[in-house]
Image (cartoon, rainbow, N blue to C red):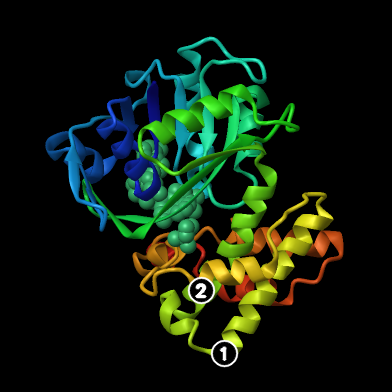
Amino acid sequence: MRFGIVGSGGVGGYYGARLVRAGHDVGFLARGSHLRAMRERGLTILSQEGDFTVPVRAEEDAARLGPVDVVVLAVKNYDVASVLAQVKTLLASKEQPSHGAPGTVVVTLQNGVDSPSEVAAAVGEAAVIGGTTYISTAITEPGVIRQAGTLHRVVLGEAFGDISRVSPRVQALRDVLAQAGLNAEAVADIRAPLWEKLAFLAAMSGFCTAARSSIGPLREVPFFREMFREAAAEVLRVAAAEGVSTTTRPDDVMRFMEAMAPEIRPSMMVDFDAGKPLEVEYLQGTVARRGHALGVPTPVMSTLYSVLMPHVRGARQG
Ligand SMILES: NC(=O)C1=CN([C@@H]2O[C@H](COP(=O)(O)OP(=O)(O)OC[C@H]3O[C@@H](n4cnc5c(N)ncnc54)[C@H](OP(=O)(O)O)[C@@H]3O)[C@@H](O)[C@H]2O)C=CC1
Ligand SMILES: CC(C)(CO)C(=O)C(=O)O
């Protein structure tokens, strides 16, 4: 299968490198010093599960990557709009699918719940598969991505059309990822997994970034656990008010957080420490704004939102 990775950072670089290692044809869209390093030295993954380097085909212009079967969209939420023209270029290289039929698809891997709709508005609903991933990865130097811990998990599902059953194209993609050694799951409807991830991540990234702490020291604080549980419950209540029926409960989110390696820092905190813009609007902001609009109180999430907002543009932009 031919993959085009749009955004070759922590998430896109890690999964793209794993697919290269499994023998797939993968083209990477990248830029700057990371692009140069990838071209000169390949892409290196540092992981407790084993370090490896793969030679890669990396470009700054999508026109040089296609045609592809699957576009993996792995830029930050705030960069999605600016790469849509590149995504369209990749899609234009093949005939467009109808729902459930094979063809070039775009898999969105952004945190938050709105990326599938944002992408669909530009390329059409039929081309979009929604996804979410649990992993902790970051670029540590150009051409090098480090994974913290060993967790990786990808959940894929339709975001539009028939969401009553797992579609054949989602199942096929899951199978390809699984054959490549990746932990991948196929679901009928991606909306619940997106909100369930948000319940965990909006709380985790909000508290860790606000406290400037990885999860280990924070969860030693008894009152933190109570606040974390309530933050997750707020998100799940907003999801319910939106009509999305989740099966995860606040206690499940708590258990997942408790099981994380203590050194894990959410990607928002990695960005904060690097002085980069933060995805606050897409995580805590989504919950606070939608809760407000739907009459669902979100005091914990709204507090985190307001505390983080002064840093949303990152240190580089003041
Ligand atoms: N990292 C993690 O552990 C996890 C992240 N996520 C989610 O995945 C998404 C991606 O995050 P992550 O991988 O951490 O992000 P990164 O910042 O590590 O990677 C994104 C990459 O895309 C590049 N990029 C952006 N715009 C362009 C462009 N126009 N042309 C070429 N390259 C471009 C960036 O380059 P540049 O640096 O120059 O801007 C960067 O290298 C986010 O929504 C995040 O919340 C989900 C689960 C875990
Ligand atoms: C918390 C973590 C690392 C877990 O998957 C994550 O998803 C993120 O920071 O974006």
Residue 63 shows in this picture: yes
Image coordinates of residue 112 in percent, x first then y, are 60, 52
In the image, is 34 to the left or to the right of 237?
A: left
Q: Residues within 10 Å of mark 2 (few under 14, many from 20)?
A: some
Image coordinates of residue 274 in percent, x first then y, are 34, 64
Give the Cα separation between the discs numbered 1 and 2: 12 Å
Element marked by disc 1 = helix
Q: How many marks?
A: 2
In the image, is 22 to the left or to the right of 209?
A: left
Q: Residues within 10 Å of mark 1 (few under 14, many from 20)?
A: few
In the image, is 307 to the left or to the right of 50?
A: right
Residue 86 shows in this picture: no
In the image, is 53 to the left or to the right of 47?
A: left
Image coordinates of residue 251 in percent, x first then y, are 66, 71
Hey, which residue is sitting farthest left in the picture? 40
| Residue tagged 2 | 258
Quadrant assignment, res 235: bottom right
Q: Which of 103 and 63 is in front in this view?
A: 103
Q: Which mark is residue 222?
A: 1
What amino acid is labelled 1 in the image? Pro
